Image (tube, grey):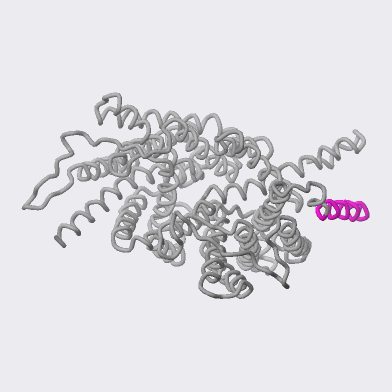
Amino acid sequence: MQWQFWIIQTLNSVAFGGLLFLLSSGFSLIFGLMRIPNLAHGAFFMLGAYFGYSLLARGGNFGLVARAAGLGVGLLGIALERLVLRQISGNEQGQVLVTLGVSFIIADICLLAWTGDPMPLPAPLELRRPLFIAGYAFPTYRLVVLAIALVAAVGLYFLMERTRIGAMIRAGVDDMEMARGVGIPVSRLFTLVFLLGSALAGIGGVLGGPILNAYPGLDADMLPLALIVVILGGAGSLLGAFVGSFAVGFLYNFGIALVPDLAYFVLFLPMVLVLVFLPQGLFGRVQL
Amino acid sequence: MTRWNAIWLAVAAALLIAVPAIIGNDFYVNMASQVLIYALFALSINMMLGFGGMVSLGHAAYLGLCGYACILLTINGFDQLTAAILALAFSTAMAGLFGMLSLRAPGLGFIMITLALGQIVWGIAYRANTLTGGDNGLRLPARPVPFGIDLSSAPRFYYFALIVVALALFFIWRFSRSPFGASLKGARDQPRRMSMLGHNVWLIRWLTFVMAGFWGSVASLLFVYYNLFLSPHALGLQQSAEILLMAILGGASSLAGPIVGAAIITLVKNVISTYVERWNTLLGMVFVVVIIFMPYGLVPGCQTLWRKITTPKSTPGNIA
């Protein structure tokens, strides 16, 4: 019984950490390259979950639905970047506040379209049955979520470290003016990174749907967690987002399970320690 | 110019004092009290924003810290004055801690850290059922009775809020014209030169953060006295964003700006939300439109317009 509790909570933590990685890796990349903390990122996650709900209700295949929702949210991200943020380029504070305004609009439209009731997303049938290993039951779906997050992490690592586009993005993160100077199309990279980051958030929303449900306020619940991941792990770094996501996943999940009253306070302490001793975060590439 | 300013001030003061007599209706007098409370919130956040260039998205945290502290102390048997003083002291001390953390990262990091801190306070208020009553919130038994004056009627509470806000305004006005205010503006525009001149830029910013936290806590006390109730909904990200928007909409570089912004947003919100449910969409759109088209806010915008009209066309140089 006691063992089962720890195993289940650990698995919940890593699955939640995987979701947080899908959310915060995009946030961190966008921030690292463009210096915009995209405060609409939580709303993108929630929108992905709602898109997933509607598409699944029409009988879509889960994997396809996740990709479609990711694409939809990604296109919205491009629209935000091209149509709104471009208008005020150079005004960083203005850009932050505009993304906050956009997140309010998205959240309110979701409330209008999908009502205030929590919408449970059904997990794929074949993943609903628990997996039995050595007499212990493991929730299959969460294992799959973790696996997908790990695949995404490896994929992003190869994209960033082993491809030409990744090298361009890294160059842009490290020194934007030099990158422009040597002919890297920074403007197109912005759009690409925004597409990638938003799409990851949308896919994360669909994958998180069966665990968290889609509900109003999901955006405001997830956004601070993504911020804390980036504060802990450091901005603009994939490794930082990875380590930070699983750290926050563990802290938050065990916090809720063991001291439900103080679940948020548990997140506060590591944030204080990191800010005091390592203000750039554990693996930060850029100044926060 | 100063004579004109004095006349304007006298007219504004007379109007504000006459508000309950002019409108007479308790509902609208209460709305005026709300405007005053939000004006103080906006003025306090503007100490950081307007003079220091620090954008905080966690100002509603003081509602949580000071508001819950005041209610909990009162419920647990402290008299109103002691509860208020202890709550203010606690909240201001927390502002000191939050300031130390947020100022570790200047610029964009400051926005993210204040937001995260604000949401942590919200999360604690929401989750710590045994302490804060969770989603149900907490009730303050009664308004305080300063010097034996009962504040339960709408006009009396309005005057109470007016006196507090006037005191705060006087302090913030002195603050903005003091050498310290000047050094804060210097720290905003030229931090490196200010350090070269021997100013401790970090300390200037931190002290401003703490003072803004103190006046935000005073506004929180008024908020709790007015509503006699506090729940986590009052201290979410939306509240912080609304307060910030008030200061930006009115014009962060002036003293009148945040007051005008608070009045407009509070009135529009009250009027709109009786007719339509979509206040959040409107709030978001106002946010986007104001920041794209009116980054300096209404009051400075109108001032430049006024100058454009009154000055001869041959000198367009003094606009901008």
Q: Quadrant of the N terminus of chain A?
A: bottom left
- Tell whether position B14 is magenta: yes
Q: Is residue A196 left or right of residue B28?
A: left
- Residue B241 in view here: yes
Q: Closer to the camera, A97 or B119?
A: B119
**Number of residue marks:** 0
What is the x, y in percent for residue A113? 44, 30
Q: Is residue B300 left or right of residue A33?
A: right
Q: Residue at x 26, y 48 (%)?
A: A15
State which region is magenta.
B1-17
- Residue B182 in view here: no
What is the x, y in percent for residue B69? 53, 67
Image vertical order of residue B207 relative to residue A214, above or below = below
Image vertical order of residue B237 relative to residue A197, above or below = below
Would you say the magenta stretch is mainly helix, strand or loop?
Answer: helix
What is the x, y in percent for residue B60? 56, 55
Image vertical order of residue B199 relative to residue A110, above or below = below
Which quarter of the picture shows residue A71?
A: top left
Image vertical order of residue A158 relative to residue B58, above or below = above
Q: Closer to the camera, A101 or A262?
A: A262
- Tell whether position B296 is magenta: no
Q: Is residue B174 left or right of residue A138?
A: right
Residue furthest to the left? A134
Q: Residue at x 24, y 42 (%)?
A: A145
What is the x, y in percent for residue B13? 84, 55
Which quarter of the picture shows residue A4?
A: bottom left
